[in-house]
Image: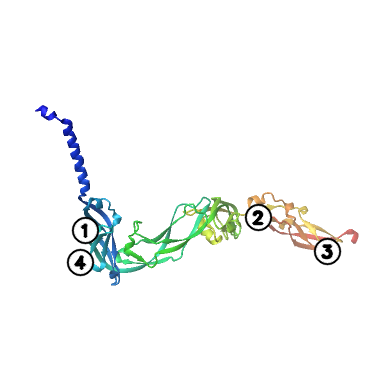
Amino acid sequence: MKNRILHNLGLKIGSIIVALLLWLTITNIDDPTVTQTFKNIPVQILHDEVISSRGYEYLVEAGDTVTFKVKGRRSLVDNLRNEDFEAVADFNNLTSMYMVPINVSCNIENADEISISLQNENMAVSLEDQLTQPFTVRVITSGKVREGYYCTDNSVSSSLVQVTGSTSSVNSVREIAVKVDLEGRMTSFTDQYELVAYDADGEPIDPRKLTFNQNSVEVTTDICPVKTLPIEVVTTGVPAVGYYVDKIEFAPSSVSIAAPQSVLSRLSKINVSVDTSGADQTIEKAIDLSDYLSDHYKGTFLTEEDGLSVGVMITIKPLAEKKFELTEDDIEIRNLSDNLEGILYSLWNADVTISGSEAEIADVTVSDLGLYIDVADCNEGTYTRQMMYQYDGPVKVSAGSVMVRLSAKEEYE
């Protein structure tokens, strides 16, 4: 028995190999029939105007994609791709059950040699009333402009767009927007952008559900250079009587603004003014720089996205006073006639008081005031004259009056 099996073993093994090769060859030559499944092929909608012409809009409930099987020779089927098929739902064939038959065709040369069987043969739709509603177009920017520059504005050629669709589709729209890419930009530019509808979750809405009165808008994007400028807080108006501005404190001390180069070249600082009219106590306030620039520096823009305020504290204090005790030597008699001589007396009403900030009055002396009386056109006799002064400093001077006796000089008697 063993000898029978081993007899001509090489020949037997060779025969088996030849048989396998022969079977493979015949199989390939024979080109058998095979089946292949194609999934999620988008369905193209035709003639949906038959719905809108009746004042309705439709929603696709099911069947916006189709799955089907293709049967045919392996040599054909193995080479098929999704792009070789076209799925169509013609709304002219809408049934009373709101179903639209789906037809799938193959666009290859030997399409008649394959058969197609659909898993879902109909598109299911629902009808709703048609709604048209206006929406403001919002510009959404992405990317960063080149360092040292800032996007100051995005102006839209048409800021309002009319959106039409089913009531539920239009009501699901949160906003209509266009997206502008700023990456690396350093100059202003204008471009055309497609409109996109977004829902409450910020997701794009299927454009097939809505129609716009225009599909795109033109957006002009202004980009300006940035400059950092010091801030200076100045006061206007006069505090209440008897009070003065003692100190001004504020922060921050500088701000970065964007503007056309022609505007920036004329600016060396940002003056922020605070009105102190009638103030009799310290003023503390926060000034919104974005609003302030808009009101006082036209054509400039704050580069801080979240806004920026200047905190200001202006200390208001009562005026300090200093009173001087005078002697005759402190008061000059002016315009005295050559034939007269004058003697000052009765200085009890000759009060001189100066008022101002503590720093201003600290170093002022009587001699700095230049006190005098004027006796022009006066003859012999006794006169009361108001004291005058020549001081032109920042402090306020209040001076009383003195008595002067004029008499003839001996040589003129």
Q: Earlier in the sequence, mark 3 or mark 2?
A: 2
> Marks 4 and 1: CB-CB under 8 Å?
no
Q: Can residue 171 be spotted in the picture? A: no
346 left or right of 221 in image: right
Q: Earlier in the sequence, mark 4 or mark 1?
A: 4
Any mark on residue 380, and which?
3
Q: Which residue is mark 4?
A: 97
179 left or right of 322 in image: left
Spot occupied by residue 132 in the image (x, y as percentages of width and height): 34, 69
Helix, strand or loop under label 1:
loop
Q: Please name the amino acid that badge 2 sits on.
A: Ser
Judge by depth and name the residue closer to the eye, 89 or 136: 89
Image quadrant in which the N terminus is located: top left
Disc 3 versus disc 2: nearer the observer: 2
Which of the 4 image quarters holds residue 52?
Answer: bottom left
Whole-number angstrom distance, CA of label 3 to CA of label 2: 36 Å
Q: Please name the amino acid that badge 3 sits on.
A: Glu
